[in-house]
Amino acid sequence: MVEEVRAEMVANVWKVVVGVGDPVAAGDALVILDSMKMEIPVISEDGGTVARIAVQEGDVVQDGDLIAVVEPVAAG
């Protein structure tokens, strides 16, 4: 099942750690947010391949905004 990673707070996108097509494991950081001078990693809950990055460094995200989409690796 496709995983849509969404912001859980209002924050600035400090760093985008992965790119489209990158493989990620459960627990890997996708982006790092900055809120009130604290760095908050946004992690993938499932492993797979990054299909979309919906933010850029410097963007401001609101609670619920789409950050990334991770597609599962096809079993085969």
Image: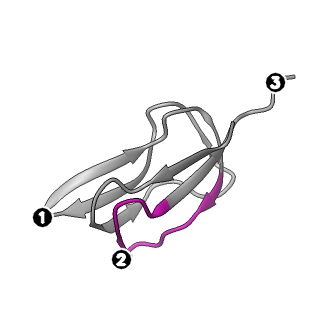
Looking at the rendered structure, which numbered label has been put on residue 36?
1
Residue 61 falls in which quadrant of the image?
bottom left
Q: What residue sits right under mark 2 in the picture?
A: 58
Check disc 2 and give the amino acid type.
Answer: Gly
Q: Is residue 22 left or right of residue 8?
A: right
State which region is magenta.
51-66
In space, the residues marked 1 and 2 are separated at their CA atoms by 15 Å
Neighbor class of circle 1 (other Cα within 10 Å; few <14, some 14-19, many 20+) is few
Neighbor class of circle 2 (other Cα within 10 Å; few <14, some 14-19, many 20+) is some
Q: Quadrant of the N terminus?
A: top right
Q: What residue sits right under mark 3 in the picture?
A: 75
| Above or below 35: residue 23 | above
Which element is circle 1 on?
loop
Residue 49 placement (x, y as % from top left): 67, 43
Which element is circle 3 on?
loop
Identify which residue is drawn at 32% across, 48% down: 41
Identify which residue is drawn at 34% across, 61% down: 63
Identify which residue is drawn at 49% across, 40% down: 44
Check disc 1 and give the amino acid type.
Answer: Met
Which comes before the other along the chain, label 1 or label 3? 1
Q: Is residue 55 left or right of residue 49?
A: left
